[in-house]
Each structure stands twice: as C-alpha cells, then as structure tokens.
Amino acid sequence: MTVTLSGDDRLIHAKLRAESPSEDVAEGKWKVVAANGDDFATARVAVGPGFSSVLTLTLARPIESDVDADVRLAYRYLDSGETVLASGQTGTLTVTATATEHILTLPPAPSATVAVELAVVSVMDPPAPVLTLSRTNLYSDPRCTALTDWAARNSWTVSLVTGQTGLPAGVTTAVQVACTSAGAASHSGLNWVGNPASTSPAVGGMPVTPGQTYAFSAYMRATKAGNVQVSYRFATGTGWTAAGVDSPAVSLAANTWTRVSFVVTAPAGADRMQASWRMPSSITWAVGDTIRLTALQVEKTDQVGPYFDGSGSDATIPTPKSTQWQVGANSSPSDLYTATAAVVMVQALEGVLEYSTDAEELLGAALERDLRRSVAEIFNVEQSLITAGTAGLLAGQLTFLCASLAQALALDSVYRMSGLVRLTSDDELDGLQHRAVGRARFNPEQALPGKASKWLLVIDFREQAR
C-alpha cells in the first residue's frame, strides 16, 4: 500500500534575499542594478537526494520601479562542497505592475544533494536612463541656420556662414553681417526679430509673458575689437510698452568668439520683444569686415546657463544628460534633460514551494497522546481527584518501508523541510499533519535471495494543526 508524504512552504517568498550586486530593500522587494544574470534574489533550503518540488512565485513590479523587469526562475542542487550537481531555469518572464504567478518545476535531486538554491535571476540589459526635463531653450533656430529673424544694420549685407570653430556643442553655423562701405560707423550689428529703434514695433518678435524673467545669451565675433551691447524693447499690439534699454557692454577681442548675455523681466502688458545685437561705439570699418552671431539661447530663468540646443550641449553641463528638439531640428524650441539610471525593482508578493514523495508502505505507527491530566491521591477517599486540561495531539513514531535507500532519503528530504508534512494513505492516519522531531533512523531490511534489499525509515513525529 503506497503512502505519500507531501507538504509546502508558504513563506518561501519571504526567504528570498538579494545578492550582490543587487540591493536589499523593504517589504520583500529587491533592486536590480546590473543585468544578464549578475543580479538575483535567492533562497537556500536544506534538502536531500530525491527531493522534488514545484515553486510558485507571484511577482510584480512595485511602484518604485521605472520599467518592467525581465527575469527567470532558477534552481541549483548543491552538495556539501557547494558543487552544483544539477540546475535549470524557466524561460524569460516579464514582471509588470500586474501581479502574476510563475511556476518552476524541480526534478528529483541527485545523490549527494544537501541543499537547493532557488533564485529569481535578472536577464535584462540595463534600461535606458530616466530623463527629467531641466531646461528649455525657447529660440527655435539657435544655430542660426536661416536668415528669417535677422537683418543688417547700417546698410551692411547679411548672410549665413558655415565651418565655424571654437563654439560650444558642435555649433558650426552663424549669421553674419559684412561692411559694404569703408569708414567710421557706430551701432553696427544685427537686428533680431525686429528693430527696437523703429517708431513702431514690427509684426512678430520674441514672444514673452508679462512678469516673466528671461535670460538671453549669444556668441559674437567681429573682425575689429570693441564693445558690444544688446538694445532691446518690449511691445504690445502695435505699440511699444516703454523706451528701449541697453544691456551692459561686453568687450570683444578681434576675431574671438565671446559670449554676450543679459537678464530682463518682461513688463506689464508686453507680449513680445525685439532687439539689436550691436557694437555701439564708432569704429572705422573696412569693406569686408564682419560681425557674426550664433548659439542664441533664451530661457525662462534669472540665471544664464551653459549653452544647449536640440543637437548638443556645452561640455560644462554635467553628465548624464540628453537634449531634444521639441518638433524639428533648428525650427523649434529645444529641451535639456538630466538623465538618471532607471530603477528596476521586483517584488515577490506570495510564494509556495510544494513537495511530495512516496514510500512503499506505512509499516507501523507507534502512537501516543498526552492527556494532560494529573491525579491527586487522597488517603481513605473512594475517588481520586483528577485535574484535566485539553488533551494533546498525537505523537510517536512512523515506520515506512522504502524500496531503496534513495526512496528513504527522498522521504527524509521532505521531513527536513520547515513546513507541515501531510500523510496520504488508505488507513485511519490519512490526512495526518505532522512534523518530524528527534531523529530519523534508516535500517536496511535483509533481502530475499535474488531480491534487492529494502529500507526502513523510522521518524519521531508530532501532530500539528495548521
């Protein structure tokens, strides 16, 4: 009459521990910081030869995780010297925000097994960094690739030039004005999105919001040394809101790119701004002398930051970073993002390790029960005084007949688990829930001629209520 011993460990998920280089975190979660098998959460259970089981883990992506995780469930049977005797794993499982059960079936453990290691292993490549918007360059053509917004002052000619060097973020294009008539002239330079010196503002301009502070900057270069200023003026509708203002002067060395910047707050009623980037002092120019401008940056801030656009950024901006055009290159505002490593986390919400094995027969059951009674004998009294509590559960010894030592060791492996053991048989002990205590005894039975020897496994046990 075959009998079956079975049990389960319903706290196996709580026994998972994250191993280096993963990080332990609270509430059964662990953080994946590397990939391709380097990160794993593991639980080690003492078992013996013949042990087989099914692991069911409910995994989910916790709210702290930025992305889903790709993992596998894996097992390794180990001997006393930590040698891997057998191993296996599932296919790739994607852990999402939806809690999902995943199953790993373990075959019988080889001989010499003393432990099984259960693991959730990362098999994902590092995810893309998480981008956080930190700055926006409002000007849509900061590299000055078109003449739409530019006009020359003092009847100079305006054009685009390429092949420029010495500029941030790989900028190589610029807008240029060139002298066409030799002689002294002041206020030479470029009008940008209008002319603040005109009687009434031109249609268009740089849109602004009243009360908003803006930081403006651009790189300028001239063939003659001198000072440069930005003359700007705010407009609303068809009129100016106030008189024009000149930014502080910045000195330009000849043929040297120099950054020119200023900060201003848009006044009440203003909806746009127009400006001239010019050299106010009288300078004697020769035909062919030039003034160039590029890398124009406009931000809603009171601080002038290092230059960036959708195609690149100044090397002084800390990494990791990323830039993007909002719509099209050189035709829309651009955004600067700080990049941080994505957090990848996995949480084991529930776990069950189910295991079972068979014996040929339950040969014997020496049972006892603690009645929890005491007797007080009273001299010359007819009846004894008995005090009684609730009777205890069953205890004693169970003797199993096993077809081989391997089968006996498999039964022993089930008894070594921390969970309850259930006995399934055709007699009155069917359904007995118990745990082994004391010692497990292995006794070989003398074999009949021509027959393999059998083994007895004797277990001290205590009945347990779930």
Image (cartoon, rainbow, N blue to C red):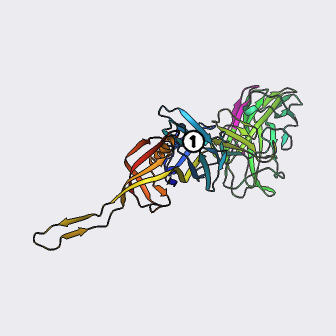
Residue at x-position 47% and y-position 34%: 80
Picture quadrant of residue 217: top right
Question: Is residue 259 inside the magenta stretch?
Answer: yes
Q: How many marks?
A: 1
Residue 131: image x %, image y %?
66, 45
Residue sitting nearer the eye, 349 or 237: 349
Apparent side of residue 392 relative to residue 429 in the rendered image (left or right): left
Residue at x-position 30% and y-position 61%: 370
> Callout 1 environment at 10 Å: few (<14), some (14 to 19), or many (20+)?
many
Residue sitting nearer the eye, 353 or 255: 353
Residue 454: image x %, image y %?
48, 43
Residue 46 seen from this side: no
Apparent side of residue 302 relative to residue 8 in the rendered image (left or right): right
**Residue occupied by mark 1:** 75
Q: Tell me which segment is drawn in magenta.
A: 243-260
Instruction: Locate the C terminus by quadrant.
Output: bottom left
